[in-house]
Amino acid sequence: MPRRQREKPFVPREITEADFATGVPEEHGIEGEEGAEQHPPAWTKAELIDSAKISPKRFDTIRKAARVKGPSHGGLKHTFSAMDLIALIQRAGSGTFNQTGRPTAEAWTELLEASGMRMPETISRERRGRGE
């Protein structure tokens, strides 16, 4: 019986300061006033844990599965970018995390939308860093 190939994980592209130099890029879905100084949205580990009502251990399990870098130990004030949050939402909602995954993904999607961003429908190969 042939071995099943593992699906390659989503690898988000980092949002850089250059992306925000001339305003907010359309591809990130951030809405803002023209000419206003925009800062990329970020959330702390504590905010993400509190909004999803999950334990820090469950959060770190989802974070590691999504291959998102995090604090070396504890680090409730460690911040996660919008692209990190999108990767976390996709992993949590993928079905791997049975009971807590979907509610966690929904809570984090609300946080993302409250910041003025929207969850992308699909992630292209170029955004994942695998342009072919």
Image: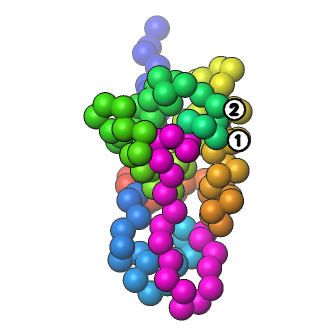
Query: Which residue is under mark 2?
Result: 102
The image shows residue 15 at horizontal and vertical percentages of: 41, 64
Residue drawn at x 28%, y 34% as measured from the top left: 72
Closest to the observer: 42 or 6?
Answer: 42
Q: Looking at the image, what colour scheme do you see?
A: rainbow
Task: Say which amino acid is labelled 2.
Answer: Arg
The image shows residue 47 at horizontal and vertical percentages of: 55, 44
Q: Is residue 113 above or below residue 32?
A: above
Indicate the quadrant containing the C terminus: top left, top right, bottom left or bottom right: bottom left
Residue drawn at x 55%, y 71% as measured from the top left: 27
Closest to the observer: 87 or 132?
Answer: 87
The image shows residue 54 at horizontal and vertical percentages of: 60, 28
Local packing at callout 2 (Cα closer than 10 Å; few below 14, some 14-19, many 20+) is some
Whether pointer 2 and pointer 1 mark residues with C-beta atoms closer than 8 Å, the reply is yes
Q: Which residues are magenta?
A: 29-48
Q: Which mark is residue 106?
A: 1
41 drawn magenta:
yes
